[in-house]
Image (cartoon, rainbow, N blue to C red):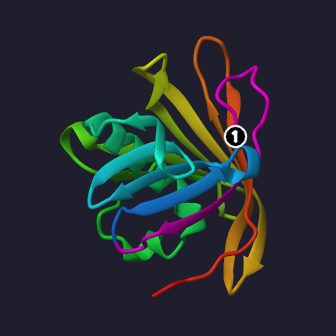
Amino acid sequence: MRASAGAAWQAFTAEQMIDTTQCAFDWRARSGPLGMVHIRDALIDGAGQLDVRALGLVPLAQVLPSAELTRGELIRYLAEIALAPDAILQNPDIRWSDEGERRLIAAAGSGPTAAEVVLTLDREGRIGEAYAPERGALVDGVTVLKPWRGVFSDYRLHNGVWLPFFGEVSWGGPEGEWAYWQGHMQTWSRRG
């Protein structure tokens, strides 16, 4: 992870739960020296959450609840459906439309939280890219709508499911596109 285009990459470890029957996820990460920085990024009960704490206690950053935060977390959920492919068929909250050859639109939410992601399929028919033209990015304490892209690769058959074991996420804008998150999946399992 990194905070800006010129910043150094920060190592992290994370665990994520993705619900396949409703739009919900809970990502918890640790970064910094000895994993002292705790990050929680989530969509729970239809509300987005994002906070960063030292030692899990002292707030370092917290984004106040808002429709834009929830919309951003819905965008993330839709983009990461490649990591929870059962949701493609099991989540009734997702609306699907065909956008032409090898492109689908996944949508969820309504009103100010309405979110859409364009999913581009690779040659094998797997999700290779997720794109949202406007996702809220926090810039100097202000939410700015920017292009947002996730790229998935290194697909492997794991527990009977094709999953991407590498992902990279980027922000776009007038300054160009820059990656702010990269991750290698280590383990995956169904819970339930």
**Image: 3 above or below 191:** above
Position of the N terminus by quadrant: top right
Residue at the spot 54% in from the left edge and 48% down from the top edge: 39
Question: What range of the chain is rendered magenta?
Answer: 1-21
Residue 100 shows in this picture = no
The vertical placement of 138 against 88, above or below, is above
Tell whether position 13 is magenta. yes
Three-letter code, disc 1: Met
For mark 1, what is the residue? Answer: 1
Image check: 16 left or right of 74? right
Seen from the viewer's position, the closer of residues 26 and 67 is 26
| Residue 126 % position (x, y) | 66, 63
Q: Which residue occupies the foreground of this view, 17 or 177?
A: 17
Left of 73 or right of it: where is 32?
A: right
**Residue 67 picture location, percent across and down:** 26, 38
Q: Residue at x 69, y 52 (%)?
A: 35
* In-image side of 173 versus 180 (left or right): left
State which quarter of the image contains the C terminus: bottom left
Give how far across and how far down residue 12 sits, in percent. 71, 51
Residue drawn at x 62%, y 81% as measured from the top left: 189
Query: Farthest left residue?
Result: 111
Which SS type dominates the magenta stretch?
Answer: loop
The residue drawn where x is 48% and y is 43% is 58
